[in-house]
């Protein structure tokens, strides 16, 4: 790879990865470092199908090994575009738009491929302004009560709908027992970042007990609430901080509640959330 190309690619906003016919990474630009958390020295000369980025699609298929779309680019010269979720170095999932282009030599022979990827805001159900989630782990029960009270007042005053989703990491205590509380905290931070990067439409996301996240959503249809809950469960279960091949996150939705005007659901919500 010549120096001129490297200089240009390092000034691009998109992540750029150059991969040879053996699927070995030969170039990794600065934006790729920023998006993934991996420095070029950590990925260069490594195969792209290792479990480093572990692309998955909406159906949960792990693309890098059994369903690698890059093979069609390298073997057949196909130009492809696909929305996937990559795993950041810190374990959380990021939605990206991935483009794959064949790389040819002067004889028009394919000598590899170029992956171009960017943060995919289109994969979010809404592109509202991203809020500050820096304290997502530290918010407590009192704030949760306050936020739910606000939602109920908003629903009753303006007649809009709202939704509440609760997801729990049901094997958190096993993770603590097998590893450490420090590692479990890293896991919870990774889940918080997964929510941050994939659910831009949410009004508030709060973690208030070990392994339990509550997501509050404004102005949503009941059918969409279930779609969002399924997406949350899928993404949290695919958050990974490299525990081990046998130890994975097990998370499930424990509460899905829909709020409408003059509904009596509030007491049920308080009982369900134990607040």
Image (spheres, grey):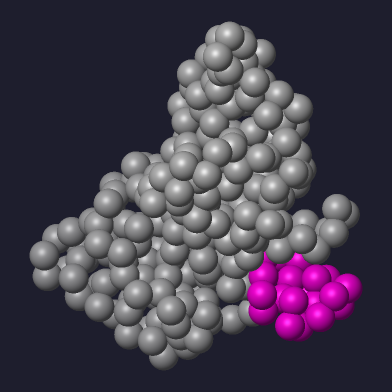
Residue 260 visible in image: no
Residue 200 visible in image: yes
Q: Quadrant of residue 40?
A: bottom right
Q: Residue at x 52, y 27 (%)?
A: 100
Q: Nearer the viewer, residue 97 or 44?
A: 44
Q: Residue at x 25, y 78 (%)?
A: 150
Q: Residue at x 50, y 55 (%)?
A: 30
Residue 152 shown left or right of residue 174 in the figure: left
Image coordinates of residue 181 in percent, x first then y, are: 76, 83
Marker count (numbered)? 0
Image coordinates of residue 174 in percent, x first then y, are: 83, 71
Residue 218 highlighted magenta (yes or no): no
Q: Residue furthest left?
A: 158
Q: Nearer the viewer, residue 112 or 59?
A: 112
Residue 185 highlighted magenta (yes or no): yes
Q: Please, is residue 24 above or below residue 127 in the view?
A: above
Image coordinates of residue 65 in percent, x first then y, are: 75, 32
Which contiguous range is marked in magenta?
Answer: 169-187
């Amino acid at each position: 790879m010549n120096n001129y190309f490297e200089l240009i690619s390092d000034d691009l906003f998109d992540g750029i990865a150059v991969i040879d016919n053996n699927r070995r990474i030969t170039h990794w630009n600065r934006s790729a470092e920023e998006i993934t958390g991996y420095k070029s020295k950590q990925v260069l000369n490594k195969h792209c199908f290792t479990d480093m980025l572990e692309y998955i699609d909406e159906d949960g298929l792990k693309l890098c090994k059994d369903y690698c779309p890059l093979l069609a680019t390298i073997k057949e010269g196909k130009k492809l575009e696909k929305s996937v979720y990559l795993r950041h170095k810190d374990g959380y999932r990021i939605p990206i738009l991935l483009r794959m282009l064949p790389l040819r030599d002067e004889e028009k022979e394919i000598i590899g491929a170029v992956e171009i990827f960017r943060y995919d805001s289109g994969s979010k159900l809404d592109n509202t302004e991203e809020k500050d989630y820096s304290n997502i782990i530290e918010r407590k029960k009192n704030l949760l009560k306050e936020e739910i009270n606000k939602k109920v007042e908003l629903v009753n005053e303006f007649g809009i709908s709202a939704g509440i989703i609760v997801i729990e990491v049901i094997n958190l205590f096993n993770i603590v027992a097998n590893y450490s509380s420090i590692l479990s905290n890293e896991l919870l931070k990774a889940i918080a970042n997964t929510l941050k990067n994939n659910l831009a439409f949410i009004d508030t996301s709060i973690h208030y007990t070990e392994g339990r996240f509550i997501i509050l959503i404004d102005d949503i249809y009941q059918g969409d609430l279930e779609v969002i809950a399924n997406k949350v469960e899928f993404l949290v279960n695919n958050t990974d901080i490299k525990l081990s091949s046998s130890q994975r996150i097990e998370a499930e939705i424990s509460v899905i509640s829909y709020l409408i005007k003059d509904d009596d659901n509030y007491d049920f919500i308080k009982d369900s959330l134990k607040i």
